[in-house]
Image (cartoon, rainbow, N blue to C red):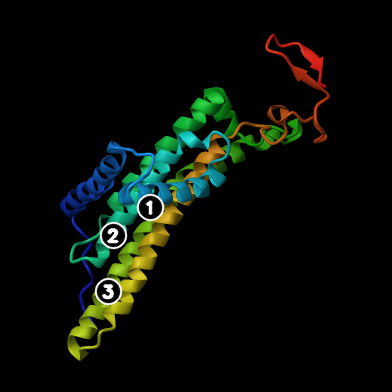
């Protein structure tokens, strides 16, 4: 067993391999979309298949209007998965350093709160921090408690994202480090199993990070009463088809 702890990758290493991971996302994306064809080639076909599946997955969490956020979430996914999978190479993964994960989580924090303010307005955003809008007046005395809980929750979200990703990636690196030390002594190819686990964990953690980010974005950008108003679907409050339709001039006329 190793007697010394595994050192975390240095900040310089994280920056270098973080740039490499970004280029690995950027360059194939440019090549795949540079000459789009009606009959896609292999590279374009792969990206269309992957992006279509991921888009449907994330849209379920982002909710109505989530199309604008899908490119950001999927870019995060591909970036994180490449960073994570560097751990199965001779190089170190940038996400094995907490600084990288805090940077990613801080970006999500800024993005979520920016769109929350843009969607609800500054007044609505601040009102949301004081508790549910339908809270009876008598319970408004506990607004300071709601405010404290919301603020703690607000900062707990990015912290949990960063710590979860860091703990899993650094943990798998440490397991590989321990197994390698044992294998070097007894010559057992057990590290192959560890690499399989690292591949699975790297992909899974990228999914978890972006799925949680999508959920935070969806919650932050939803309008109050979105589920109650169904005018766009032509139904009334009871779920029946509306008896009237609106003309372009805005007048209600009976539907045929």
Give the number of the mark in front: 3 or 1.
Answer: 3
Mark 3 surroundings within 10 Å by alpha-carbon count, few (fewer than 14), some (14 through 19), many (20 or more): many
Secondary structure, mark 3, is helix
Image side of residue 178 versus residue 155, left or right = left
Label 2 and label 1: CA atoms lie apart by 10 Å
Where does the N terminus fall, quadrant-wise? Answer: bottom left
Q: Residue 91, located in which quarter of the rendered image?
A: bottom left
Q: CA distance from mark 3 to mark 1?
A: 21 Å
Q: Residue at left 52%, top 46%?
A: 215
Q: Quadrant of residue 253?
A: top right
In percent of width and height, residue 65 lies at: 54, 33
**Which residue is identified by label 3?**
176
Q: Which residue is mark 2?
A: 96
Residue at the image position 18 percent from the left and 56 percent from the top:
10
Secondary-structure class at tag 2 = helix
In the picture, measured across the screen, residue 169 lies left or right of residue 59, that is: left
Comparing 61 with 24, the one in front is 24
Q: Dividing the image into 4 quarters, which one contains the C terminus?
A: top right
Q: Which tag, 3 or 2, sits closer to the chain's start?
A: 2
Q: Is residue 14 above or below residue 241?
A: below
Q: Is residue 151 visible?
A: no
Q: Residue at x 23, y 69 (%)?
A: 6
Q: Which mark is residue 119?
A: none
Among the 4 quarters of the image, the one containing residue 125: top right
Q: Dot 1: within a 10 Å radius of its alpha carbon, few (fewer than 14), some, or many (20 or more) residues? A: many
For marks 2 and 1 on the same chain, the one whose residue lies earlier in the sequence: 2
Q: Position of residue 26 (x, y in %)?
A: 26, 43
The mark found on residue 162 in the picture is 1
């Amino acid at each position: 067993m190793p007697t010394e702890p595994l050192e975390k990758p240095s900040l310089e290493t994280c920056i270098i391999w973080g740039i490499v991971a970004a280029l690995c996302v950027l360059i194939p994306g440019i090549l795949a979309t540079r000459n789009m064809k009606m009959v896609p080639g292999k590279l374009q076909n792969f990206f269309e298949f992957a992006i279509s599946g991921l888009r449907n997955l994330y849209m379920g969490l982002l909710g109505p209007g989530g199309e604008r956020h899908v490119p950001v979430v999927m870019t995060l996914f591909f970036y994180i998965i490449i960073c994570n999978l560097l751990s199965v190479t001779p190089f170190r993964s940038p996400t094995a350093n907490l600084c990288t994960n805090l940077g990613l989580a801080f970006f999500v924090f800024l993005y979520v709160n920016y769109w929350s303010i843009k969607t609800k307005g500054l007044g609505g955003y601040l009102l949301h921090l004081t508790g549910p809008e339908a809270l009876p007046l008598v319970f408004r005395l506990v607004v300071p408690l709601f405010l404290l809980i919301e603020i703690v929750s607000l900062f707990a979200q990015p912290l949990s994202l960063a710590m979860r990703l860091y703990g899993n990636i650094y943990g798998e690196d440490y397991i590989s480090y321990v197994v390698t030390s044992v294998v070097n002594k007894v010559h057992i190819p057990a590290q192959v199993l560890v690499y399989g686990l690292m591949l699975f964990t790297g992909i899974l953690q990228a999914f978890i990070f972006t799925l949680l980010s999508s959920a935070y974005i969806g919650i932050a950008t939803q309008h109050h009463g979105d589920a109650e108003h169904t005018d766009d679907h032509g139904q009334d409050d009871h779920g029946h088809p509306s008896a009237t339709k609106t003309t372009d001039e805005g007048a209600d006329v009976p539907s045929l």
